[in-house]
Image: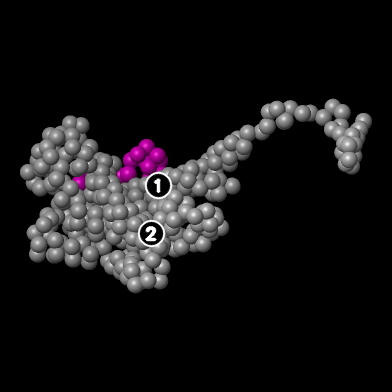
Amino acid sequence: MVTTTEPEGGPAIPARPAGTRTHRRFFPARRGDTRYGALTRYLGVRALLIIPTTWILVTLVFFLMRVIGDPITAAQGGRLTPEELQRRKEAAGLTRPILTQYRDYLSGLLRGDFGRSQDNRAISDVIVTYGAATLELVFWALLVAFAVGVPLGRYAATKRDSAADVSLRLFAILVYAAPVFFVGLLLKLIFAVKLGWLPVAGRASTTVELQLQHVSPKTNIMIVDAILYGDTGNIVDVLKHAVLPAIALGLLTAGVFLRLVRINLIQTLRSGYVEAARARGLSDRVVTGRHAFRNALIPVVTVMGMQIAMMLGGAVLTETTFEWKGLGYQLATYLQARDFVAVQGIVAFIAIVVAVMSFVVDLIVALIDPRVRF
């Protein structure tokens, strides 16, 4: 039964039907449950997408490597007799059906086996030894990209359409379009050859490398090993060797960050909540720094995964230019030796790293921006 009550001086208001549950008044639904549930679903889907993404990438690598022929003939053709070539192909399992080779290749990847090089070295050992060097280079390059691109993008947005803004936009286009190897050679000629301020190549001086061989535990990350060694001179030497390669590789991404921060900060400064902040009498510096700048950084984080993938590709040229002995340097060496099994293993590993990094970036973006969870 429904009853009505009529307050004094007002219309009748329907009363709550008899038996209606009123527990929500005392135990309201927690809003966080929906938010965290959406976040969990989003990250779960993104985590599951790693599997097909990685599978597609490693499959493409496998079959593209087979388009050029079997790796034994590519590496040793003309050096061995046909009988010896055939014997080596049979020993490597290359005479079996292509789908059988593909199945064994996938099962090996699941066990962490990326194959063996022509000198019978496990590619997984190569990845452990030289992957740390590439990781270190990408880390330094990202620091350069953030240190250059983000502040300059913010400054360009606050000076929109001025001479400084136009100059910075041209700078962003220039550093993005310039080939990495050309920038590297130019930096070497200016700062290493002409001015003599920085080393020409390598990850450290020969003496320092010999000293760091005895560090325990050895990480193969030169700056970490130098810190563990405990000699300030070694740390300075390692940092000097990292400057030019990091700038050469980092400027490429710095141009992207500069343009992204500029465009998104300009759009954010036009939004309603920024205008409301200005109406409350806040200065432009406070409005930009406290209200607009953080939101303008979200697209930078979003594209970071793609930029890391580009850095891994650019690391091949950077490491070759500066003789930085990482995965890119080894990949170029294996390409020259036509060791396509080793090339296939390293490229497959890089593909897996890119897929995982894409998930990590999605996780960071989801934590920063709740809008991506729904």
Q: Which residue is mark 2?
A: 154
Question: Callout 2: few (<14), some (14-19), or many (20+) C-alpha neighbours within 10 Å?
Answer: many
Question: Callout 1: few (<14), some (14-19), or many (20+) C-alpha neighbours within 10 Å?
Answer: some
Residue 96 drawn at (x, y percent): 37, 48
Figure check: 55 above or below 13: below
Frontmost residue, 141 versus 154: 154
Image quarter where the N terminus lies is: top right
Mark 2 to mark 1 CA distance (whole Å): 26 Å
Q: Which residue is mark 1?
A: 357
Q: Is residue 355 magenta?
A: no
Residue 289 drawn at (x, y percent): 42, 52
Q: Which residues are magenta?
A: 103-121
Q: Amino acid under label 1?
A: Met
Judge left or right: residue 374 versus residue 85. Answer: right
Q: Residue shown at 26%/50% (left/top)?
A: 140
Furthest toward the left, the residue is 207
Residue 289 shows up from this direction: yes
